[in-house]
Amino acid sequence: MQNDTNNAPVQQPALKLASLKKSLRLFRYVKPYWPQFALGLIFLLVSSLAGLAFPQLLGNLVDPNSKSDLFHGMNKSAIVLVTLLIGQAVFSFFRILLFVNVTEKTLATLRQTVYSHLIKLPMKFFLERRVGELSSRISADISSLQETFTTTLAEFIRQMIMIIGGITILAVTAPKLTIFMLAILPLMMVLAVFFGKFIRRFSKQVQELVASSNTVVEETLAGIVNVKAFANEFFEIARYKSRTNEAARVGIKGGKYRGAFSSFIILGIFGALVAVIWRGVSLGIHPAQLMTFVLYSVFIAGSVAGLAEVYTNLQKSIGATEHLLEILDEPVEDLTPVTKIAEENHLDGSISFRGVSFHYPSRPDLNIMNDVSFEVSPDQKVALVGPSGAGKSTIVSLLLRFYDPIKGEICFDGRPGSSIPLSELRSQMAVVPQDVFLFGGTIRENIAYGKPDATDAELEEAARKANAWEFIQRFPQGLDTVVGERGIQLSGGQRQRIAIARAVLKNPRILILDEATSALDSESEKLVQDALDKLMEGRTSIVIAHRLATVREADKIIVLDKGRIVESGTHWELIELEGGLYRTLSEMQFSS
């Protein structure tokens, strides 16, 4: 488990034109549904304009001069008002329906795009990020955009129409009173923006702290075996409690500002109403006209107050957008679907390291490999030996092109690895790691990961070659047995054999083994080693060896120390070297 050294929430920049312009990139995902979106905007425009007629019609209701004999003495304005209400309700329904349809389709596309981009990013990206954080980006941040597309955007447009349209009508009907009303309005708007700035800051902090607490959950559940083995349940509970309490504390502090803002709006609205009525009476305006003016003022004031909330929501959405765009702006690996490998890219299995030096992107000051050169012939079994940190696993990462060398080059069949399409190169390799990762589905799904379109016959054959078919048959559901999270319902030996069956099914040209038997009991080790021996036949094999007894029969043993090759040869050649590292390591293992 990782302990955080810096949990401070990241402060987001203020809402600026550049941020807003950047966020508009999201509308490219709306483009396929633009006709529906445009129709929804038309419905929104019509319902908003209809809303502008309400104050005038309500004013007419109390105007005795507007009475007529229509419909047995009913007020004509009331009939029009009811008709408008019904029309507005219908238009609002279809507007919401259209916006929801567009939003759900857009967010589905966005989720797919972000996930597709994320999974294509290079390994160096994942070294600098945590699983919980990335998971939060796809779930929480995209979900926060749902409200923006469904409600916030519509509210912004509606309220702007109400403000601009209402002020225009008032300026025409009662210019003097409008000037008086507008003298009060700017002060409210300035204070609304001021409050919005503080509210946004706290909402951003809450967002970051919630993401941080989600990271604790992700890590704890992923490492639940370690948590329980170290009896650290209460430590993790305290860690999660600390994060969520901090999020609550910041949220409460932000709530104080929101409460103060709401109080200010209430005070401002009613204070402005009293002032407008007083001024209207002093100007001798007709009561019906004054009522219409007051109603328009209420509509405008309500829209100004609503804009502050919309502003806060927009800031929240822009923050979420920036997080997503940060991921989408990261350069991806040059990957392509592999349906068939081009003839010129088929590997024979020869590998050449030529003066390779390397350091990890996150640790540029620490060289992991220094001027490493060696050759591997097709179908050769080569073992990598050395103390921990010598660079064995780094060689595997470079072979798979998780990273590229800082200096030198790695060639396959005499061709630089960079000249072979990355997906085609990796599709001809398979890795059987020491710590096997199984997906939480069935045995069938885990084996078929090596070849998704494999038939049941191919799956059975692969399982037999991996010495896994015997225990698979003992399960009532056979291949359809659910293995549980990370394969927790299988033993270590069973997980290893599933991983070997997966590699058998892939039928790679180059096989990479990270000492797959080091953590097994004697019986399981024998079965797994037998399966590995079958798997290594007829293909180039690179074996990371922690237990030297497993590599005595290797065609070549490369001994690494501190990122350099210090010895190379067969077991019998290296064991004869007086004072050699391999001999020293061998004596330490076999004498214990």
Image: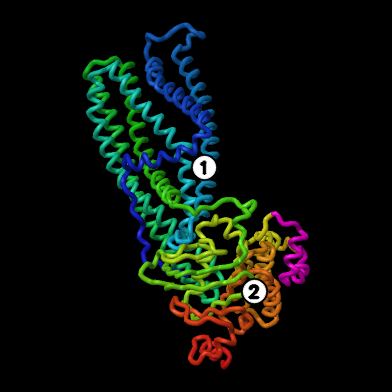
Is disc 2 placed on a helix, strand or loop? helix
Magenta segment: 453-477
Which disc number belongs to residue 286?
Answer: none
Q: Would residue 297 be counted in the magenta stretch?
A: no
Q: Quadrant of residue 127?
A: bottom left
Q: Amino acid at mark 2?
A: Gly
| Mark 2 or mark 1, earlier in chain | 1
In front of the other: 460 or 313: 460
Task: Point out residue 154 in the picture as x, y percentages from the top left corner.
Answer: 44, 33
> How was this image coloured?
rainbow
Q: Amino acid at mark 1?
A: Leu
Q: Which residue is mark 1?
A: 107
Q: Residue at x 74, y 62 (%)?
A: 459
Indicate whether 312 appears above or below 269. below
**Looking at the image, do the residues carrying marks 2 and 1 touch, with CB atoms under 8 Å apart?**
no
Is disc 1 placed on a helix, strand or loop? helix
Instruction: Give the CA separation, mark 2 to mark 1.
Output: 40 Å
Q: Is residue 432 visible?
A: no
In front of the other: 325 or 228: 325
Task: Tell which residue pokes out farthest to the top in this image.
Answer: 69
Q: Which residue is mark 2?
A: 492
Task: Tell which residue pokes out farthest to the front in this image.
Answer: 414
Indicate whether 592 appears above or below 167. below
Task: Point out residue 145 in the picture as x, y percentages from the top left corner.
Answer: 46, 43
In front of the other: 485 or 577: 577
Please tell me whether the stretch drawn in magenta is mainly helix, strand or loop. Answer: helix
Indicate whether 521 appears above or below 432. below
**Quadrant in the picture for the C terminus:** bottom right
Q: Label 1: few (<14), some or many (≥20) within 10 Å?
A: some
Q: Would residue 456 be counted in the magenta stretch?
A: yes
